[in-house]
Amino acid sequence: MTSLTTPQAAPAAGDRAERIERIRQAAYRIRRNALDMGEVQGQGYIGQALGVADVLAAVYTDQLRYRPEDPHWPARDRFLLSIGHYAIALYAALAEAGTIPAEELETYGSDDSRLPMSAMASYTPGVEISGGSLGHGLAVAAGMAIGLRHQGNGARVYNLLSDGELDEGSTWEAALACAHHGLDNVTAIVDVNALQADGPTAGVLRTEPVTDKWRAFGWHALRVDGNDVAALVDALDELRAHRGSPGVLVCDTRIGRGVPLLEGREKAHFMRVEEHEWQIARDQLQEGTTR
């Protein structure tokens, strides 16, 4: 697997250009390691991993406070993955963070591995909640944030959701609760890749205008191109500084981002990649970094 570096405590030091370059390099490694993990199984949620890599790189490289050697450090920022099937992306980010060894990524999805195909808190260091059925992550985030506030703990809670997860009524109940309690230590991040298991999101259950809905629910809401690192940095900085209400970052991402072979593939929610295509994908990803 690709060699990794350990990020600094958030917010990362350095000027804006240095931060952006650091995140871009981390996003490349996350994508590369996700491809390598995907090859172990020959299939999986690789399209989502490629699409959300910039977001995860920005969060783990530039924003989160944590100690790689101590995943249960009480003062850590919590990162909750509501969408458990994005585990392949989270594992790559945790390896980038130094929380799990890079070489362990080779065990992804294998028997007795700590890296199951759907994220589970009881298995993997750095995984805060078990994923699976959608619609629970934001409610857990609300409970954690209230508990941290009562403890006088300044840690923040981040929750990565998908646009498909906005179909769940429990998500909006939790959104109301976060606003009602003024949980400005909560940041929700919504990956809008416009695709879910049953087809395009707009055809399954239309959720737009997403940003306006979050604002109507009492959130400080921003929307950016989730594959634009500079935009991510500025938006996450603004949300971290915001006080008085919870914040949400709506990120428009592209399935398979960085690998043209996979960007336009049909039935991309759970993707089958032929044996000979994995090296083509890695080559295309590398070529994209030199343009």
Image: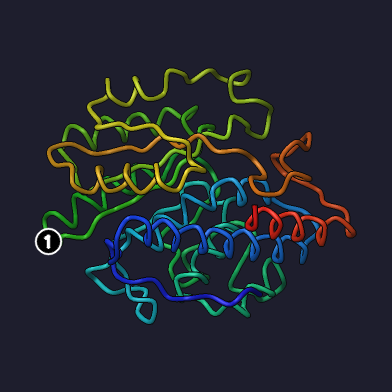
Which is nearer the eye, 197 or 202?
202
Q: Quadrant of residue 104?
A: bottom right
For residue 183, above or below residue 65:
above
For residue 163, above or below residue 133:
above
Q: Quadrant of the N terminus?
A: bottom right
Return the x and y of residue 169 as percentages of the image width and height: 42, 27
Q: Does residue 9 appear left or right of residue 264 in this picture?
A: left
The image's colouring method is rainbow
Return the x and y of residue 7 as percentages of the image width and height: 39, 71
Q: Does residue 41 appear left or right of residue 27 in this picture?
A: right
Q: Quadrant of residue 12?
A: bottom left
For residue 66, above or below residue 231:
below
What residue sits 75% from the left and 36% below the top? 264
Return the x and y of residue 36 as percentages of the image width and height: 71, 66
What residue sits 35% from the left and 49% below the top? 233
Q: Residues within 10 Å of mark 1 (few under 14, many from 20)?
A: few
Which kind of residue does numbered mark 1 sit on? Gln
Element assignment for label 1: helix
Return the x and y of residue 266 as percentages of the image width and height: 78, 34
Going by the picture, which residue comes out furthest to the front?
291
| Residue, disc 1 | 151
Query: How many circles with numbers are drawn on the protein?
Result: 1
Q: Quadrant of residue 75?
A: bottom left
